[in-house]
Amino acid sequence: MMPRLRSALAAGFVFFSLNSVFGGENPAPTNQEVLSRIFTAPILKLLTDSLPPAAPLVIRESPGKGLEAWLIQNLTDSCLAQKYLVYSSPDSGVSYGYALEISGAGVQIQYHSAGRRWLFFKKGVRRTFEGDFHLRALRPDRQVLYSRRVAVAYQDVIPAGLLERVENPDLPFTQGTKSGSSVINRWLEPVLVTATTITLIYLFYSLRSTK
């Protein structure tokens, strides 16, 4: 009786582990959350390494209403959360603080097939984010502290059923484009899934026959 119980528990554990890896509904960050994280992280690191705590900071406003304006708003919120004294420009009239200028921001989001639905497996989608922007930081005396183009990238795999939930229809730059699988991937994915299924069946009956 005990060997059969151990076999059932072992097979159930294997099934649960593979289902968690290939088919688990893990919470996925939205595209907007990912963009906020990857764009603001390098800027905040620059501020932490270069500016004294709670330093006056002027963030130059962007005349546009797209990605750059959204990015500056997110950066402002993040800097306030880090206890910096943030001012907008040019209405603030502040000329003695550090200054940040962001321009030329762009991003591309692509979706690639990361697996086919087969038995208990759930089809996944690989998200790829690639973006860049130009960042310039000035000291209070207007000496250029930092000026270069910054590249950002991120990728993960999410369940295909969550694809529509991660986009924001009100923010076009959060919407991605789908890219088809290559010929190799289309042949390779079913082979891998079939091999895994056969292995599971073999393990189940092998453990079951063990006494």
Image (tube, rainbow, N blue to C red):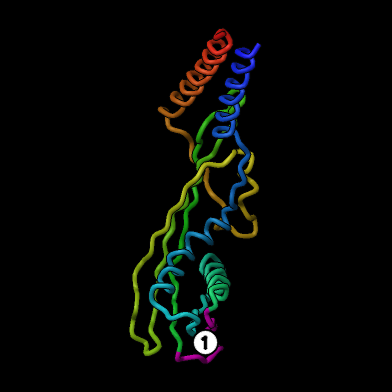
Quadrant of res 49: bottom left
Query: The residue tagged with tag 1: helix, strand or loop?
Result: loop
Is residue 117 visible in the rendered image? The answer is yes
Which residue is located at x 49 percent, y 65 percent?
A: 40
20 or 98, nearer to the observer:
20
Three-letter amino acid code at the position of disc 1:
Pro
On whether residue 137 falls in the magenta region, the answer is no
The correct choice, above or below, for 55 with respect to 77 in the image is: below
Q: Which residue is mark 1?
A: 90
Q: Quadrant of the N terminus?
A: top right
Q: Position of residue 79 (x, y in %)?
A: 53, 74
68 or 192, nearer to the observer:
192
Q: Quadrant of the C terminus?
A: top right
Is residue 69 visible in the rendered image? The answer is no
Which residue is located at x 45 percent, y 65 percent?
A: 105
The correct choice, above or below, for 109 with respect to 189 in the image is: below
169 or 145, nearer to the observer:
145
**SS majority, magenta:** loop
Q: Position of residue 131 (x, y in %)?
A: 44, 58
On whether residue 93 falls in the magenta region, the answer is yes
Q: Position of residue 43 (x, y in %)?
A: 44, 69
Q: Specify start and end residues of the magenta stretch as a single range.
A: 84-96
Which residue is located at x 52 percent, y 41 percent?
A: 157
Instruction: Determine crowd level at label 1: few under 14, some 14-19, many 20+ residues with C-alpha closer than 10 A.
Output: few
